[in-house]
Protein backbone atom coordinates (compact mmCIF):
# COMPACT_ATOMS: atom_id res chain seq x y z
CA UNK A 1 0.00 0.00 0.00
CA UNK A 2 1.35 3.44 -0.91
CA UNK A 3 2.04 6.10 1.70
CA UNK A 4 -0.87 8.11 0.32
CA UNK A 5 -3.32 5.19 0.71
CA UNK A 6 -2.04 4.50 4.21
CA UNK A 7 -2.69 8.12 5.13
CA UNK A 8 -6.21 7.96 3.66
CA UNK A 9 -7.18 4.87 5.67
CA UNK A 10 -5.61 6.32 8.81
CA UNK A 11 -7.81 9.38 8.35
CA UNK A 12 -10.81 7.11 7.82
CA UNK A 13 -10.16 5.38 11.14
CA UNK A 14 -9.82 8.70 12.94
CA UNK A 15 -12.97 10.01 11.25
CA UNK A 16 -14.93 6.94 12.30
CA UNK A 17 -13.69 7.23 15.89
CA UNK A 18 -14.65 10.89 16.02
CA UNK A 19 -18.12 10.13 14.64
CA UNK A 20 -18.76 7.38 17.19
CA UNK A 21 -17.59 9.52 20.10
CA UNK A 22 -20.48 11.89 19.42
CA UNK A 23 -23.00 9.14 20.10
CA UNK A 24 -24.49 8.17 23.43
CA UNK A 25 -23.23 4.70 24.44
CA UNK A 26 -25.29 3.12 27.26
CA UNK A 27 -24.56 -0.18 28.90
CA UNK A 28 -25.38 -3.36 26.98
CA UNK A 29 -28.44 -4.35 29.04
CA UNK A 30 -29.80 -0.82 29.44
CA UNK A 31 -33.48 -0.54 28.52
CA UNK A 32 -34.37 2.14 25.98
CA UNK A 33 -37.14 4.57 26.88
CA UNK A 34 -37.63 7.09 24.03
CA UNK A 35 -39.18 10.57 24.49
CA UNK A 36 -42.56 8.97 23.61
CA UNK A 37 -53.71 -18.90 -0.57
CA UNK A 38 -50.25 -17.57 1.30
CA UNK A 39 -47.83 -15.62 -0.85
CA UNK A 40 -44.49 -15.82 0.89
CA UNK A 41 -41.38 -14.18 -0.55
CA UNK A 42 -38.01 -14.53 1.16
CA UNK A 43 -35.94 -11.63 -0.11
CA UNK A 44 -32.75 -13.71 -0.19
CA UNK A 45 -33.65 -16.89 -2.09
CA UNK A 46 -30.66 -19.19 -1.43
CA UNK A 47 -30.82 -22.88 -0.78
CA UNK A 48 -29.31 -23.94 2.49
CA UNK A 49 -26.55 -25.98 0.83
CA UNK A 50 -25.54 -22.96 -1.27
CA UNK A 51 -24.78 -20.81 1.76
CA UNK A 52 -21.02 -21.05 2.13
CA UNK A 53 -20.62 -19.41 5.53
CA UNK A 54 -22.42 -20.87 8.52
CA UNK A 55 -22.96 -18.49 11.42
CA UNK A 56 -21.85 -21.27 13.72
CA UNK A 57 -18.34 -20.66 12.41
CA UNK A 58 -16.34 -17.95 14.14
CA UNK A 59 -15.56 -15.06 11.78
CA UNK A 60 -12.16 -13.46 12.26
CA UNK A 61 -13.25 -10.05 10.99
CA UNK A 62 -15.98 -8.20 12.94
CA UNK A 63 -18.55 -8.78 10.23
CA UNK A 64 -22.26 -8.04 10.22
CA UNK A 65 -24.41 -10.74 8.59
CA UNK A 66 -28.06 -10.03 7.71
CA UNK A 67 -31.11 -11.83 6.38
CA UNK A 68 -34.65 -10.70 5.70
CA UNK A 69 -38.04 -12.06 4.74
CA UNK A 70 -41.50 -10.86 3.83
CA UNK A 71 -44.96 -12.41 3.49
CA UNK A 72 -48.33 -11.00 2.50
CA UNK A 73 -49.94 -13.05 5.29
CA UNK A 74 -53.21 -14.98 5.13
CA UNK A 75 -55.78 -12.21 5.25
CA UNK A 76 -54.45 -9.35 3.08
CA UNK A 77 -54.77 -8.95 -0.68
CA UNK A 78 -51.59 -6.93 -1.17
CA UNK A 79 -48.40 -6.07 0.66
CA UNK A 80 -48.03 -2.66 2.31
CA UNK A 81 -44.64 -3.35 3.94
CA UNK A 82 -41.25 -2.23 2.65
CA UNK A 83 -37.76 -3.33 3.72
CA UNK A 84 -34.24 -2.15 2.91
CA UNK A 85 -30.92 -3.77 3.86
CA UNK A 86 -27.35 -2.73 3.18
CA UNK A 87 -24.43 -4.60 4.73
CA UNK A 88 -20.85 -3.76 3.76
CA UNK A 89 -17.32 -4.11 5.07
CA UNK A 90 -14.10 -2.21 4.51
CA UNK A 91 -11.10 -4.28 5.61
CA UNK A 92 -7.71 -3.04 4.44
CA UNK A 93 -4.40 -2.64 6.24
CA UNK A 94 -5.43 -1.97 9.84
CA UNK A 95 -8.81 -0.52 8.86
CA UNK A 96 -11.93 -2.58 9.61
CA UNK A 97 -15.24 -0.78 9.19
CA UNK A 98 -18.37 -2.97 9.27
CA UNK A 99 -21.41 -0.95 8.16
CA UNK A 100 -25.07 -1.88 8.17
CA UNK A 101 -28.25 0.03 7.36
CA UNK A 102 -31.61 -1.68 7.93
CA UNK A 103 -35.10 -0.21 7.44
CA UNK A 104 -38.62 -1.59 7.91
CA UNK A 105 -41.75 0.41 7.02
CA UNK A 106 -45.37 -0.69 7.40
CA UNK A 107 -47.88 1.22 5.28
CA UNK A 108 -51.00 2.09 7.22
CA UNK A 109 -54.03 0.04 6.14
CA UNK A 110 -57.13 2.10 5.49
CA UNK A 111 -55.13 5.12 4.34
CA UNK A 112 -54.85 6.11 0.68
CA UNK A 113 -51.59 4.95 -0.90
CA UNK A 114 -50.43 3.13 2.24
CA UNK A 115 -48.42 0.67 0.17
CA UNK A 116 -46.81 3.52 -1.76
CA UNK A 117 -46.03 5.49 1.41
CA UNK A 118 -43.95 2.68 2.92
CA UNK A 119 -41.82 2.33 -0.22
CA UNK A 120 -41.35 6.08 -0.53
CA UNK A 121 -40.34 6.34 3.12
CA UNK A 122 -37.82 3.48 2.94
CA UNK A 123 -36.24 4.90 -0.21
CA UNK A 124 -36.03 8.43 1.16
CA UNK A 125 -34.51 7.27 4.46
CA UNK A 126 -31.97 5.01 2.74
CA UNK A 127 -31.00 7.73 0.26
CA UNK A 128 -30.44 10.23 3.07
CA UNK A 129 -28.25 7.93 5.17
CA UNK A 130 -26.23 6.70 2.19
CA UNK A 131 -25.52 10.24 1.01
CA UNK A 132 -24.74 11.63 4.47
CA UNK A 133 -22.87 8.72 6.09
CA UNK A 134 -22.06 5.79 3.80
CA UNK A 135 -20.60 7.59 0.79
CA UNK A 136 -18.51 10.07 2.81
CA UNK A 137 -16.98 7.34 5.00
CA UNK A 138 -16.13 5.04 2.08
CA UNK A 139 -15.04 7.66 -0.44
CA UNK A 140 -11.53 8.88 -1.22
CA UNK A 141 -10.62 10.84 0.71
CA UNK A 142 -12.90 10.02 3.64
CA UNK A 143 -15.08 12.98 4.61
CA UNK A 144 -16.99 12.17 7.80
CA UNK A 145 -20.24 14.02 8.46
CA UNK A 146 -20.12 16.98 10.79
CA UNK A 147 -23.42 16.02 12.47
CA UNK A 148 -23.86 13.09 14.86
CA UNK A 149 -25.54 9.89 13.69
CA UNK A 150 -28.54 10.70 15.88
CA UNK A 151 -28.97 14.07 14.17
CA UNK A 152 -28.58 12.49 10.72
CA UNK A 153 -31.13 9.77 11.53
CA UNK A 154 -33.62 12.34 12.77
CA UNK A 155 -33.16 14.37 9.58
CA UNK A 156 -33.70 11.18 7.56
CA UNK A 157 -37.03 10.51 9.25
CA UNK A 158 -38.18 14.04 8.47
CA UNK A 159 -37.01 13.67 4.85
CA UNK A 160 -39.08 10.48 4.59
CA UNK A 161 -42.09 12.28 6.06
CA UNK A 162 -41.80 15.10 3.52
CA UNK A 163 -41.36 12.61 0.67
CA UNK A 164 -44.68 10.95 1.58
CA UNK A 165 -46.47 14.28 1.67
CA UNK A 166 -45.12 14.98 -1.83
CA UNK A 167 -45.32 11.59 -3.55
CA UNK A 168 -48.08 9.76 -1.63
CA UNK A 169 -50.38 12.41 -0.13
CA UNK A 170 -52.89 10.86 2.22
CA UNK A 171 -50.65 7.84 2.81
CA UNK A 172 -49.06 6.90 6.09
CA UNK A 173 -46.46 4.49 7.36
CA UNK A 174 -44.39 3.40 10.29
CA UNK A 175 -40.61 3.46 9.93
CA UNK A 176 -37.93 1.83 12.04
CA UNK A 177 -34.34 2.18 10.89
CA UNK A 178 -31.00 1.09 12.35
CA UNK A 179 -27.49 2.07 11.33
CA UNK A 180 -24.54 0.03 12.61
CA UNK A 181 -20.98 1.32 12.50
CA UNK A 182 -18.14 -0.02 14.58
CA UNK A 183 -19.36 -1.34 17.92
CA UNK A 184 -22.67 0.47 18.23
CA UNK A 185 -25.96 1.15 16.49
CA UNK A 186 -28.31 4.11 16.25
CA UNK A 187 -32.03 3.56 15.82
CA UNK A 188 -34.72 5.96 14.61
CA UNK A 189 -38.35 5.01 15.06
CA UNK A 190 -41.90 6.17 14.38
CA UNK A 191 -45.01 4.00 14.71
CA UNK A 192 -45.44 0.43 15.93
CA UNK A 193 -42.92 -1.61 14.00
CA UNK A 194 -40.32 -2.78 16.49
CA UNK A 195 -36.59 -3.26 16.99
CA UNK A 196 -35.24 -5.78 19.48
CA UNK A 197 -31.86 -6.96 20.64
CA UNK A 198 -31.98 -10.74 20.97
CA UNK A 199 -29.34 -11.79 23.48
CA UNK A 200 -27.54 -15.17 23.33
CA UNK A 201 -29.54 -16.35 26.36
CA UNK A 202 -32.82 -15.71 24.51
CA UNK A 203 -33.73 -12.48 26.29
CA UNK A 204 -35.45 -10.06 23.90
CA UNK A 205 -34.73 -6.44 24.79
CA UNK A 206 -37.09 -3.95 23.12
CA UNK A 207 -35.30 -0.92 21.68
CA UNK A 208 -38.41 0.95 20.55
CA UNK A 209 -41.72 2.00 22.06
CA UNK A 210 -44.98 1.68 20.13
CA UNK A 211 -46.62 4.97 19.21
CA UNK A 212 -50.11 3.51 19.56
CA UNK A 213 -53.10 4.63 21.59
CA UNK A 214 -53.39 1.25 23.29
CA UNK A 215 -49.70 1.23 24.27
CA UNK A 216 -50.14 4.68 25.76
CA UNK A 217 -53.11 3.45 27.81
CA UNK A 218 -50.96 0.56 29.01
CA UNK A 219 -48.13 2.93 29.98
CA UNK A 220 -50.61 5.05 31.96
CA UNK A 221 -51.80 1.95 33.82
CA UNK A 222 -55.34 2.16 32.48
CA UNK A 223 -55.19 -1.30 30.86
CA UNK A 224 -53.01 -4.36 31.34
CA UNK A 225 -50.63 -5.83 28.75
CA UNK A 226 -53.05 -8.74 28.35
CA UNK A 227 -55.92 -6.32 27.64
CA UNK A 228 -53.70 -4.36 25.24
CA UNK A 229 -52.94 -7.50 23.21
CA UNK A 230 -56.62 -8.00 22.35
CA UNK A 231 -57.84 -4.39 22.39
CA UNK A 232 -59.95 -3.57 19.29
CA UNK A 233 -57.98 -0.33 18.74
CA UNK A 234 -54.51 -1.81 19.21
CA UNK A 235 -53.49 -0.83 15.66
CA UNK A 236 -54.46 2.85 15.98
CA UNK A 237 -51.33 5.05 15.93
CA UNK A 238 -50.91 8.56 17.28
CA UNK A 239 -47.61 9.09 15.47
CA UNK A 240 -46.80 8.03 11.88
CA UNK A 241 -44.99 9.38 8.85
CA UNK A 242 -47.21 11.23 6.40
CA UNK A 243 -49.94 11.76 9.02
CA UNK A 244 -50.04 15.11 10.79
CA UNK A 245 -47.39 17.60 11.83
CA UNK A 246 -45.32 18.25 13.78
CA UNK A 247 -43.91 15.07 15.30
CA UNK A 248 -40.63 13.91 16.77
CA UNK A 249 -39.06 10.55 15.98
CA UNK A 250 -37.51 8.50 18.76
CA UNK A 251 -33.75 8.24 18.27
CA UNK A 252 -31.29 6.35 20.47
CA UNK A 253 -27.81 4.82 20.38
CA UNK A 254 -26.95 1.39 21.80
CA UNK A 255 -23.91 -0.90 22.08
CA UNK A 256 -23.81 -4.00 19.90
CA UNK A 257 -24.45 -7.18 21.87
CA UNK A 258 -21.64 -9.66 21.27
CA UNK A 259 -22.97 -12.79 19.55
CA UNK A 260 -26.49 -11.35 19.73
CA UNK A 261 -28.97 -10.32 17.06
CA UNK A 262 -30.89 -7.26 15.97
CA UNK A 263 -34.47 -7.95 14.90
CA UNK A 264 -36.58 -5.29 13.16
CA UNK A 265 -40.11 -6.39 12.31
CA UNK A 266 -43.63 -5.21 11.63
CA UNK A 267 -46.59 -5.92 13.88
CA UNK A 268 -47.53 -8.78 11.56
CA UNK A 269 -44.80 -10.72 13.36
CA UNK A 270 -44.67 -9.43 16.93
CA UNK A 271 -48.46 -9.15 17.11
CA UNK A 272 -48.93 -12.81 16.13
CA UNK A 273 -45.97 -14.68 17.62
CA UNK A 274 -44.97 -14.47 21.32
CA UNK A 275 -41.51 -13.09 22.05
CA UNK A 276 -40.41 -16.39 23.61
CA UNK A 277 -41.25 -18.20 20.37
CA UNK A 278 -39.50 -15.56 18.26
CA UNK A 279 -36.24 -15.85 20.22
CA UNK A 280 -36.48 -19.65 20.19
CA UNK A 281 -36.71 -19.67 16.39
CA UNK A 282 -33.82 -17.22 15.99
CA UNK A 283 -31.44 -19.09 18.31
CA UNK A 284 -32.31 -22.47 16.76
CA UNK A 285 -31.56 -21.32 13.19
CA UNK A 286 -28.09 -19.77 12.75
CA UNK A 287 -28.59 -19.33 8.99
CA UNK A 288 -30.44 -16.03 8.99
CA UNK A 289 -32.47 -16.55 5.81
CA UNK A 290 -33.81 -19.78 7.31
CA UNK A 291 -34.58 -18.07 10.62
CA UNK A 292 -36.51 -15.30 8.84
CA UNK A 293 -38.53 -17.81 6.82
CA UNK A 294 -39.43 -19.74 9.97
CA UNK A 295 -40.54 -16.51 11.64
CA UNK A 296 -42.84 -15.82 8.69
CA UNK A 297 -44.17 -19.38 8.86
CA UNK A 298 -44.91 -19.02 12.57
CA UNK A 299 -46.85 -15.79 12.01
CA UNK A 300 -48.87 -17.36 9.21
CA UNK A 301 -49.56 -20.46 11.29
CA UNK A 302 -50.93 -18.09 13.95
CA UNK A 303 -53.45 -16.74 11.45
CA UNK A 304 -51.37 -14.28 9.42
CA UNK A 305 -53.77 -11.36 9.97
CA UNK A 306 -51.35 -8.79 8.54
CA UNK A 307 -48.37 -8.42 6.23
CA UNK A 308 -45.20 -9.75 7.83
CA UNK A 309 -41.69 -8.32 7.42
CA UNK A 310 -38.52 -9.09 9.34
CA UNK A 311 -34.85 -8.15 9.15
CA UNK A 312 -32.43 -10.18 11.27
CA UNK A 313 -28.82 -9.10 11.80
CA UNK A 314 -26.14 -11.20 13.48
CA UNK A 315 -23.85 -8.95 15.49
CA UNK A 316 -20.09 -9.57 15.54
CA UNK A 317 -18.75 -12.09 18.07
Image: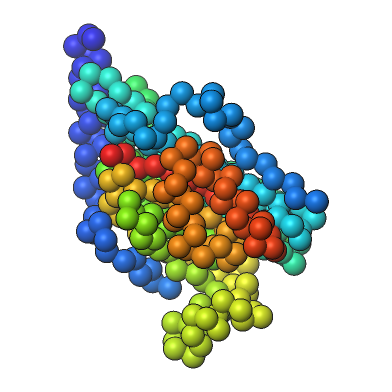
Relative to residue 23, is residue 236 drawn left or right?
Answer: right
Residue 140 at x, y percent in the picture: 34, 22
Q: Who's the residue at 54% across and 30% down the image?
A: 48
Q: How many marks?
A: 0
Answer yes or no: is residue 172 visible: no
Answer yes or no: is residue 186 visible: yes
| Residue placed furthest toward the top | 2
Residue 231 at x, y percent in the picture: 61, 81
Relative to residue 182, is residue 245 drawn left or right?
Answer: right
Q: Who's the residue at 47% across and 63% down the image?
A: 275
Relative to residue 41, is residue 2 drawn left or right?
Answer: left
Q: Who's the residue at 32% across and 55% down the image?
A: 201
Q: Which quarter of the rendering shows the N terminus? A: top left
Q: Which quarter of the rendering shows the C terminus? A: top left
Q: Considering only vertical position in the picture, is 223 above or below 39?
A: below
Residue 294 at x, y percent in the picture: 57, 48
Taking depth in this image into account, of 78 and 258 the one nearest to the observer is: 258
Q: Considering only vertical position in the picture, is 103 above or below 231?
A: above
Q: Who's the residue at 58% across and 66% down the image?
A: 271
- Res. 25 image quadrant: bottom left
Amino acid sequence: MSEKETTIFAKARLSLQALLKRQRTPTEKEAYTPTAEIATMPLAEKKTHEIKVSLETSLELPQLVAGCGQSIGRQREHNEDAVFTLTTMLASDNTQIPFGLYIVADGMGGHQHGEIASGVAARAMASHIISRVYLPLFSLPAEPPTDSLQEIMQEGILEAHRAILKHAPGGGTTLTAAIMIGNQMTIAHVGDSRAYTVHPDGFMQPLTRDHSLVKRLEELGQITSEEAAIHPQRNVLYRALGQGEPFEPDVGTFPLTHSGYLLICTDGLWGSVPEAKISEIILANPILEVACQKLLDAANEAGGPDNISAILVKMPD
